[in-house]
Amino acid sequence: MSRQKPLKRQMQIADTELDQARRFGDQTSIDMAAAKVEKLNTQLLAITARLAEQGTIGQFSAGVTTKSAEVVQRRKRSAVATDGVVQLPLVGAEKRASPNCLLRGAVFAVLKKGQRATLMREKVASQGGYEVLFSGIQLDQADLDVWLHCLHLSRDCLGEHVEVGLLPFLRGIGRTEGAASQEWLRDSLVRLGMAVIQVKHEGVTVMVADRMVVYEEREQVSKSTISLRVSPTMARLFGVARWTSIDSNVRTKLVGRPLAQWLHAFLATHAKPIALPVSTLRELSGSRAGELRLFRRTLRQAIVHLVNAGFLASWKITEDDRLQVLRA
């Protein structure tokens, strides 16, 4: 809306100039003023159309194949539904698509060991006009790695069961393959299987309560296989301008640094991040750091890791205690 208002003001000025030209000017002045009005009107119509499209997914009628050019093009901007097949947006091999509303808040919180709480339809901190209700055992940034990979594996067939080996799954998220890692992955999948979210945007329900993942493990002689399913309703969170492509290589570099991972995901959702108060970042991240000064200290350390990972070019905490960053 911020881009519409200046254009509307410019349109009013241009209309006034055109009226004056018609009253007092020559034909050249009239033509120039009319061309300016037409150009501004074209820009305003284009912005209005883009805003109207925000939050929508591509809906295609029966007979249109998932590999058709129009479907592929639309998948670059949003999720699509094609003759009963629901698919997530297309991203590069090293990227992972995720809804902004789950990255700009505390669904995947910054937690220390032993801090997980069990919530029941509790509103978690979020940004951008979203209301997210969460039920289940609290999730953290390591769980986000698992969920992003579940989405990645299911991207072409939401609602269908996808099978993957336990060890290949761990490799896919940059984890070791030892027994401890396997047990951790099982625990994470259980938490995600229990987690239920409901999302509203500016008072309108975007997604009804649904589980984040359905999974089961199938023991075999030489390996364990995971069968997982992501509900098609999850596609509603991947509307136009409502999702972000996350660099999985950067996240892998930040494994074990939850605040750095949260900041990476949060900042990635903003093309030009604005300076936010440190206190707001603490709330949105779900951090349970006691005093603000303790969170600020951890925040500084996390930012250094983001610079070292090549994600940020520069940063500073301003005099009024806001984090200001420049993306690399």
Image (cartoon, rainbow, N blue to C red):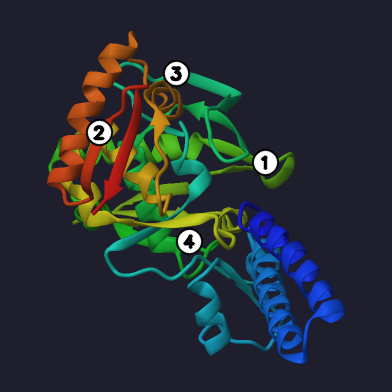
Instruction: Indicate whether 221 appears above or below 317.
Output: below
Where residue 78 sits, quadrant-wise, is bottom right
Q: Which of marks 4 and 3 is nearer the N terminus?
A: 3
Q: What residue type is labelled 1?
A: Lys
Q: For residue 117, which numbered disc appears in the image?
A: 3
**Mark 1 vs mark 4: in front:** 1
Instruction: Indicate whether 132 appears above or below 150.
Output: above
Q: Which sits in the foreground, 327 or 112?
A: 327
Instruction: Name the residue beneath numbered marker 4.
Output: 161
Q: Is residue 307 left or right of residue 264?
A: left
Asked whether the viewer can see residue 186, the reply is no
Inter-mark Cα distance, 1 to 3: 23 Å
Disc 2 element = strand
Q: Which of marks 1 and 2 is nearer the N terminus?
A: 1
Instruction: Name the residue beneath numbered marker 1.
Output: 200
Q: Residue at x 28, y 12 (%)?
A: 293
- Furthest residue toward right: 23
Inter-mark Cα distance, 4 to 3: 30 Å
Where residue 60 sits, quadrant-wise, is bottom right
Q: What residue type is labelled 3?
A: Ala
Asked whether the viewer can see residue 89, the reply is yes
Q: Which sits in the foreground, 104 or 189?
A: 104
The reply to whether callout 4 and callout 3 are in contact (CB within 8 Å) is no
Instruction: Residue 328 in the image: state x and y as whole percent.
Output: 23, 54
The reply to whether callout 1 and callout 2 are in contact (CB within 8 Å) is no
Q: For residue 326, which numbered disc appears in the image?
A: none
Instruction: Name the residue beneath numbered marker 2.
Output: 316
Q: Which of marks 1 and 3 is nearer the N terminus?
A: 3
**Mark 2 vs mark 4: in front:** 2
Where residue 163 sits, quadrant-wise, is bottom left
Q: Earlier in the sequence, mark 2 or mark 3?
A: 3
Q: What residue type is labelled 4?
A: His
